[in-house]
Image (cartoon, rainbow, N blue to C red):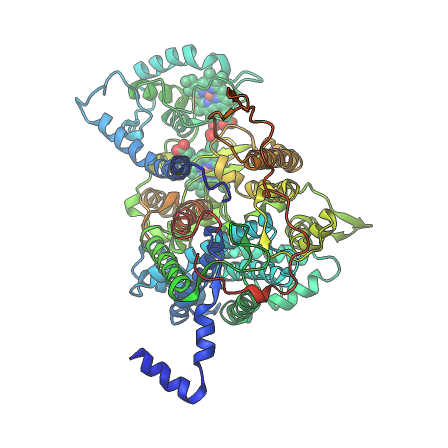
Amino acid sequence: MIRRAVGFFDDRIGVAPGARKLLRYVFPDHWSFLLGEIALNSFLVLVGTGIFLTFYYSPSDAQTVYNGAYEPLRGLSMTEAYWSTLNLSLDVPAGLLMRQTHHWAANLMIVAITVHLLRILLTGAFRRPREINYVVGVTLLALTVLEGFAGYSLPDDLLSGMGLVIAYGVAMSIPLLGGDLSFLIWGGEFPGSAEFFPRLYIVHVLLVPVAIAGLIGAHLAMIARQHHTQFRGRIATERNVVGYPLWPGYALKSGGLLLVTAAVLFLLGGLVQINPIWQWGPYEPYLSTNGAQPDWYLGWLLGGLRLMPALEVQLGSWTLVPNPFWGGLAFPTLVFLTMYAWPWIDRRWLGDNRRHELLDLPRDNPRRTAIVMSYFSWVLVVFVAGSIDRLYFRSTIPYEAQIWFLRIAVFVVPVLTYFAAKRLCEELRDRERHPLRGWNGKVVRRTPAGGFETLELDEGVPAVDGGNGRPGAPSEEQEAGAGTGGR
Amino acid sequence: MSGSGRPRLHRRVRVGAALVLAVGALASLALEEDAPAQGGRAGLEQARPGGPSADEQPTAGPVERPAPGLEPGDPAMVAQGRRLFVDGCSSCHGPDARGVRGRGPSLRGVGAAAADFYLGTGRMPIDDPDDEPIRAKSPYDPEQRRALVAYVAQFGGPPIPKVDPAKGTLSQGLELFTEHCASCHQVAGRGGMLTGAVVPDLQESEPETVAEAIEVGPYLMPNFRGQFDQKELDSIASYVEYTKELEDRGGWGIGNIGPVPEGMVAWLLAGGALLLTIRLIGKRTPT
């Protein structure tokens, strides 16, 4: 049957060679190579559930009165945006399941991208020749965060309104341009004109998702073109690609992972409540709630705003650089610029401009691992600062003391992390190098004279080509080696 | 990884440890969520006549609070209150409730509303006059509290306000609460932090406590005296009652405080489950 169908197409447009090549395409296998796929799968779930949500959501700030079944809100006037999200959540069959799954998928997608990024950084996968794809990946992270924020803002509930106020404040704080720029985006002073929600909506359902989809396509195409990196193994070298063919093998694994990801997300969507907007109530500019938080992936921006001391640049009576600029814009820009520049920083710093098809184990390169971990710990401390009031509001430590503690930790923790990670890697690497690691038997040898002697193991052990000592120049045309299928 | 000889057991132990951590973190959330409910139940149980330890355990539960229609001048009660006051309160508030500089304010004119609020929630007596008074178990039994309130009340001041949540409107309560209280108490009454004070959650507050807090304005909380009419007061109280049993239509409410626990679920539950999955289906050692 399939054979006939394939035959039909092959006969006419000659697909067989292409298809054969595609099905035989080899993927190196390691669990950590699947992290990116979790992000991709989450994106697919997001698109699917998102389409459902568009059937019910209305991006309008026209006022209506809620008269639905949920008593605490009955009779309140609210925007249509909030009303339609309420209706979607409380009255549309399966609406809440879809909305919650959508939200969980967004949270998970960025978790997966973050861990995937960490894997890329720690194993040196960003090195030549994969810098372009790395840059695409970092852009995907930035876009996903932006997309998440736009989505979080759409329901126009109390929390999303408070998020938008902060975004507005940060946009306003851009030196010189801020005022005009935010007026352009919001169509006027906060909360903006009637065009704002339709605009935000198009950004969320069209512009950014299409950009993300396009970049994901480019990301995957480049992986296909360049082949995936692999860890050094008994067979795997700089010159070949060792792994499973697409069919039967990798495709089944990936398909399975897609199903598991979707299952986990729908389970959460059905069982664990996320962003219960009916409990937050509608937003008005004069309203606020204690402990309002953005979704987790923006926590580090909130933390940046909080940790930054009240520093402003003044020119006479005119504030050139208002305070929110530092934590809300300068800090994330710095973080992203550093990430973008990382392949080039790493190359300079380690003096290594060779092509790499093989990955390092994190321990192989203690300096890189240490600096990456240190960098992440820096962002992590700022991130913790963003949620500190929620995590510790029951503790007796005063809020100001916590903030000062964190301000110091921002500098101290990365340094400590650096040395701890470096030390750990060095130790792991040294242990690894020893071919008889963990072996505590004894070697007894017969001497020429006919007696026996016990060998001291520290000497006479042959050096093993492993750990750091990569062979010289890797092949320039690794394509040639592609296709070492099977194991 | 390249150390292919790593014993499997260790891996299991590590995965296990990670799971235990994750579950622990989530369980603490769950506990936090249940705590108020249990508190409320315990209070009810103790109120039941003949219930265990109903007598020797004075409770902070406001179930047995003084009747609002208390005889203001019942001399026997005032006398008992005065004795208790001299023993337990005069060190800070002075022997005749005129206050002691640097230790406690004068209580003349604060009225039964303030006295009942501070005593009923166990905020008074406190140990250190510089601390924020927080809800605690009162060392006095209900009758003693009634006597103390009667004693403070005789110096004048607002009486214990009347409130009936059943007469309020939930949506009006939500609107007023969001406008006047949520910036400190969080929109679902889950509490939070202020510079200089911890704002309590309101899951243990009875309607009378809410009305009293509005009247008195304890600690950093402003007083809203005269700002709400009776209907509005009832509505706020009914909303606070409602927040004790929020409608969690989406499933497990994870504390009803928004994205922080949600992020934890995303990382620990979803992230953890999928990490385990890829560890199972992906290879762990290079070929």
Residue pictured at 38% horizontal, 69% vertical: A52
Residue B97 is at least partly visible in this image? no
Q: In the rendering, at what x and y percent does residue A293 appear?
A: 51, 48
- Does A3 sit above or below residue B36? below
Tell me which residue sits at (38%, 50%) in the image: B277
**Image: B245 above or below A110:** above
Residue at the extreme right: A316
Which quarter of the figure has residue B16?
top left
- Where does the image place residue A197, in percent across and percent down from the top left? 52, 68
Q: Which quadrant would the N terminus of chain A be assigned to in this image?
A: bottom left
Q: Quadrant of the C terminus of chain A?
A: bottom left
Whole-percent x, y for residue B99 in the image: 52, 18
Q: Specify whether A184 is left or right of B40.
A: right
Question: Is residue B17 shown to the viewer in this render?
Answer: yes
Q: Report how many numbered discs are placed on residues in the image.
A: 0
Farthest residue in the left direction?
A: B50
Image quadrant assignment for residue B121: top left
